[in-house]
């Protein structure tokens, strides 16, 4: 048995790092870190785009950016944040920690792992090359037909959109396959599927979602590329194509996609809530089961993005019902996490603060989401700033907060150093304040009649006031991010060295060294419960002994 | 840019949620009633979640040196957390079905009162029974239920007047319908709500709801040809309009200008605004628009004809006489 979880790991393997080493690595931890660096890089760019947009929209009838620039900026903001920030950031954590949590030394296919990263990264670079090639895509991240066709958008941006996303999609699918095989075949002896940590369980469901959903996007992108380059007629209404076919194909991917961005987040929160409450999850089976329910339902709800396209009441009623149902398993989860904190001993670390903030922000985002499943309300609020508010509440309050939560939780294991909690708390409060300031008022703007994706707006009563509040909030979020970057920089330079197990964790990644080397484990303890490392540390209180 | 309509708008919404509580059409009334129920349910759920979170945080904070025994919540709470949301889902689904069918009943072969066609980046309104075609300032009768047929000439647009409630997309290659019963006359502001290209933001929408008499009067005046031009400068302008090929895109009834790709200009001078409400309709603005269209509405389909000031003035004189 490995008795060395307190022993300082020899860091020799990390001593003489050279660029070449990063370029050629197949180690899942290094690839995970590269995913996070890639996400950070694109986050900075897309975040600056967001600030440009909020500057443009700060006052009515502004001429800071023209429509041509603004439409490229908002499109690139959306595409980048979704495909090259949130997906890689969450995949980064999964690629890094799923093998460690199941007691494996790497993913099943390390070379494919590296391939996935690089092809995703190159996809992102190709997308950005469009700026040099004559103009970035400018038809929004969901790029509706027939506006995406050559006769309406003749700049090459949309061709780069197609090819860039095809490459990134290929990378994401192969990571999905890799993680499925890793989780199914590489678990430590004794660890049944009912005992894997929830982060791993969510990763498994999420990987199946990726593998099932992305092909629909890839098909749509290929068809669009054929339309644009070879004059096929899939979506070109002028020559008999179908504009709504694009929407069906896109949202058949797109709705599972938003769950691809939230399920790993649920996984991170589940771990964080447990560890910082000092308690096992309340209702493991419910959390895991409701995730499967969400994943299955997610393939039957896509039309709720299309309630206003005139598909008819019968179709709308079906998809309205399925969309409302998704609220149920999601609601269960909120109460499972509350139940986990109940009766625990809650430590308010930065990681935990983000998890708690998530509970409330995500409830707001979830409730405004339910509004879209109530079809008549959807008719009123869809395509307005209400949608912008809703999607940022779930993407930021849900997914991005999980990345911050995971970053503060796992940073010790990734760098061997502890992030500064005091700076972290400043960052947290600035972020939460800025975020709510930016997006809460947008609910009202939507209800008042401001459509989304407008580069400017008329000076209607109170439009400028609310937009100005929103823009100030965005600035505050920008400051918060600077505080985070300073924190990371300071920590990497001279942060407090971390022990192997700084948070009194439950899962196997904390059993490894403070900074794991090429090999994660010499050996792993026998897994008899859902908290193998807890059992190892507290044999008298071990989960498998008392089954309460 | 300037929206001269702001001063005429009859909605005097002051509080932020007035848009939900105050409706100008019976469709919006139905939708907003449901919306208010939803807001109450949502506020209740949010209140419960925030309340539970705060209570749990107050009660179960980690205390240094205090040995704690983890407590578990009883499993019956899980039944409750499924039961209550499930109940709410059923209630709201039933309400959804009822409201949906009231707001958007079947068309059943009824002829549309007005056919609206979305163009990049303006609106065409066609009154088939009266053979009237106009653009951007859409006159509709108040006090009775009318049926709008929605079409698109190019990409997808979306009809939305917030005071009237529901949106409906204008999809190329598809016919969509929308029922509307405007409660009282007035000027209502809306906008295209589906991203449709460079000037999506510049595709505002104005509905002028009128009582039956005014509406009939408007229709009659627009069904007839504009008065004969007597002014000499305007007569030069009329000739120039054809010579400069304006008529390839714009229609002026009673002349050889039959274009349908741009807004119908037959009664242009009777409109209060230009460019879907972005600027006021006066000679000055019209002249600027003809001379520098891409500066006023960048991305609009109106090309810059590199016209000299004098020609522009003559065309403006002509267009301003089209009452």
Image (cartoon, coloured by chain):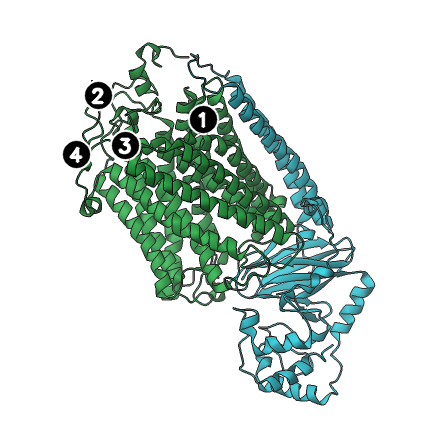
Chain colours: A green, B cyan
Q: Earlier in the sequence, mark 3 or mark 1?
A: 1
Question: In front of the other: label 3 or label 2?
Answer: 3
Question: In front of the other: label 1 or label 2?
Answer: 1
The residue tagged 3 is: A416
> What is the x, y in percent for residue B44?
63, 30
Determine the residue positioned at 34% across, 22% down: A506
Q: Earlier in the sequence, mark 4 or mark 1?
A: 4
Asked whether the beta carbons under mark 4 and mark 3 sit within 8 Å of each other, the answer is no
Residue A421 falls left or right of residue B236: left
Return the residue nearer the eye: A319 or A284: A284
Mark 3 → mark 1, Cα distance in angstroms: 21 Å
Q: Quadrant of the N terminus of chain A?
A: top left
Asked whether the beta carbons under mark 4 and mark 2 sit within 8 Å of each other, the answer is no
Graded by Cα atoms within 10 Å as few (under 14), some (14 to 19) or many (20 or more), the crowding at tag 1 reads: some
Residue A501 falls left or right of residue B248: left
Asked whether the beta carbons under mark 1 and mark 2 sit within 8 Å of each other, the answer is no
Residues marked 4 and 1, same chain: yes
The residue tagged 4 is: A12
Give the structural element (helix, strand or loop) at label 1: loop
> What is the x, y in percent for residue A57?
55, 55
Q: Earlier in the sequence, mark 4 or mark 3?
A: 4
Give the structural element (helix, strand or loop) at label 3: loop
The residue tagged 2 is: A4
Graded by Cα atoms within 10 Å as few (under 14), some (14 to 19) or many (20 or more), the crowding at tag 4 reads: few
| Label disc, if present, on residue A348 of the rendered structure | 1
Graded by Cα atoms within 10 Å as few (under 14), some (14 to 19) or many (20 or more), the crowding at tag 3 reads: many
Determine the residue positioned at 18% across, 47% down: A20
Mark 4 → mark 3, Cα distance in angstroms: 13 Å
Report which quarter residue B192 is drawn in.
bottom right
């Amino acid at each position: 048995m490995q008795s060395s979880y307190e022993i300082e790991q020899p860091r020799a393997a990390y001593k003489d790092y050279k660029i070449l080493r990063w370029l050629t690595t197949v180690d899942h931890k290094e690839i995970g870190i590269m995913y996070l660096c890639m996400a950070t890089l694109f986050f900075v760019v897309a975040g600056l785009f967001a600030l440009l947009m909020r500057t443009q929209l700060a006052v009515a009838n502004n001429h800071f950016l023209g429509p041509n620039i603004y439409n490229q900026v908002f499109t690139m903001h959306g595409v980048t944040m979704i495909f090259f920030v949130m997906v890689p950031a969450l995949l980064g954590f999964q690629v890094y920690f799923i093998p460690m949590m199941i007691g494996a030394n790497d993913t099943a296919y390390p070379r494919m792992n590296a391939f996935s990263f690089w092809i995703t990264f190159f996809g992102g670079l190709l997308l950005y090359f469009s700026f040099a090639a004559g103009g970035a895509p400018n038809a929004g991240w969901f790029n509706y037909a027939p506006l995406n066709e050559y006769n309406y958008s003749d700049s090459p941006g949309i061709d780069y959109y197609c090819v860039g996303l095809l490459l990134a999609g290929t990378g994401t699918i192969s990571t999905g396959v890799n993680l499925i095989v890793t989780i199914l075949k590489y678990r430590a002896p004794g660890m049944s599927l009912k005992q894997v940590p929830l982060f791993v369980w969510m990763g498994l469901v999420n990987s199946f979602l990726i593998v099932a959903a992305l092909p629909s996007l890839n098909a749509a992108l290929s068809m669009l590329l054929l339309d644009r380059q070879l004059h096929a007629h899939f979506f070109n209404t002028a020559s008999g194509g179908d504009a709504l076919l694009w929407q069906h194909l896109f949202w058949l991917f797109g709705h599972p996609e938003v769950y691809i961005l939230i399920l790993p987040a649920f996984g991170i929160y589940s771990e964080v809530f447990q560890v910082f409450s000092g308690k096992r999850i309340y209702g493991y089976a419910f959390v895991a089961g409701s995730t499967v329910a969400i994943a299955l339902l997610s393939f039957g709800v896509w039309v709720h993005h299309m309630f206003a396209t005139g598909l008819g009441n019968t179709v709308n009623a079906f998809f309205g019902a399925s969309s409302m149902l998704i609220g149920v398993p999601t609601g269960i989860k909120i109460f499972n996490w509350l139940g986990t904190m109940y009766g625990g001993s809650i430590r308010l670390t930065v990681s935990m603060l983000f998890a708690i903030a998530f509970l409330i922000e995500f409830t707001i985002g979830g409730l405004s989401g339910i509004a879209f499943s109530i079809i008549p309300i959807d008719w009123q609020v869809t395509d307005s700033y209400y949608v912008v508010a809703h999607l940022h509440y779930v993407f930021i309050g849900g997914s991005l907060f999980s990345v911050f939560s995971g970053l503060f939780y796992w940073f010790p294991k990734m760098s061997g150093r502890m992030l500064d909690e005091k700076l972290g708390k400043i960052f947290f409060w600035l972020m939460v304040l800025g975020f709510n300031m930016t997006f809460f008022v947008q609910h009202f703007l939507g209800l008042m009649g401001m459509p989304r994706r407008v580069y400017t707006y008329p000076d209607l009563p109170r439009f400028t006031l609310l937009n100005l509040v929103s823009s100030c909030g965005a600035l505050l979020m920008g400051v918060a991010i600077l505080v985070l970057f300073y924190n990371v920089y300071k920590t990497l330079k001279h942060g407090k060295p971390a022990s192997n197990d700084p948070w009194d964790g439950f899962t196997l990644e904390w059993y490894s060294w403070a900074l794991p080397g090429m090999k994660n484990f010499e050996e792993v303890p026998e897994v008899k419960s859902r908290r193998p490392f807890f059992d190892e540390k507290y044999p008298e209180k071990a989960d498998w002994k008392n089954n309460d | 840019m300037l929206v001269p309509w702001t001063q005429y708008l009859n909605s005097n919404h002051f509080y932020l949620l007035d848009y939900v509580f105050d409706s100008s059409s019976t469709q919006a009334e139905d939708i907003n009633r449901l919306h208010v129920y939803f807001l109450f349910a949502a506020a209740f759920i949010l209140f419960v979640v925030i309340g539970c979170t705060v209570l749990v945080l107050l009660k179960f904070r980690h205390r240094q040196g205090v040995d704690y025994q983890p407590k578990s919540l009883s499993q019956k709470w899980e039944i409750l957390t499924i039961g209550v949301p499930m109940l709410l889902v059923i209630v709201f689904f039933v309400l959804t079905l009822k409201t949906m069918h009231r707001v958007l009943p079947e068309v059943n072969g009824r002829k549309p009162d007005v056919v609206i066609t979305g163009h990049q980046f303006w609106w065409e309104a066609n009154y088939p029974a009266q053979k009237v075609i106009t653009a951007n300032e859409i006159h509709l009768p108040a006090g009775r239920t009318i049926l709008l047929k929605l079409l698109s000439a190019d990409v997808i647009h979306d009809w939305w007047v917030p005071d009237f409630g529901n949106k409906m997309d204008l999809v190329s290659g598809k016919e969509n319908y929308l029922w509307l019963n405007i409660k009282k006359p007035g000027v209502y502001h809306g906008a295209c709500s589906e991203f449709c290209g460079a000037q999506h933001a510049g595709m505002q929408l104005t509905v002028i709801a009128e009582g039956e008499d005014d509406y009939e009067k408007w229709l009659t005046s627009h069904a007839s040809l504009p008065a004969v031009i007597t002014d000499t400068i305007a007569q030069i302008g009329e000739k120039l309009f054809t010579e400069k090929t304006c008529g390839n895109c714009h229609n002026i009834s009673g002349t050889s200008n039959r274009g349908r790709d741009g807004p119908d200009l037959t009664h242009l001078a009777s409109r209060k605004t230009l460019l879907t409400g972005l600027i006021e309709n006066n000679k000055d603005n019209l002249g600027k628009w003809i001379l520098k269209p891409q500066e006023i509405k960048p991305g609009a389909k109106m090309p810059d004809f590199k016209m000299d000031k004098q020609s522009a003035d003559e065309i403006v004189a002509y267009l301003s006489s089209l009452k």
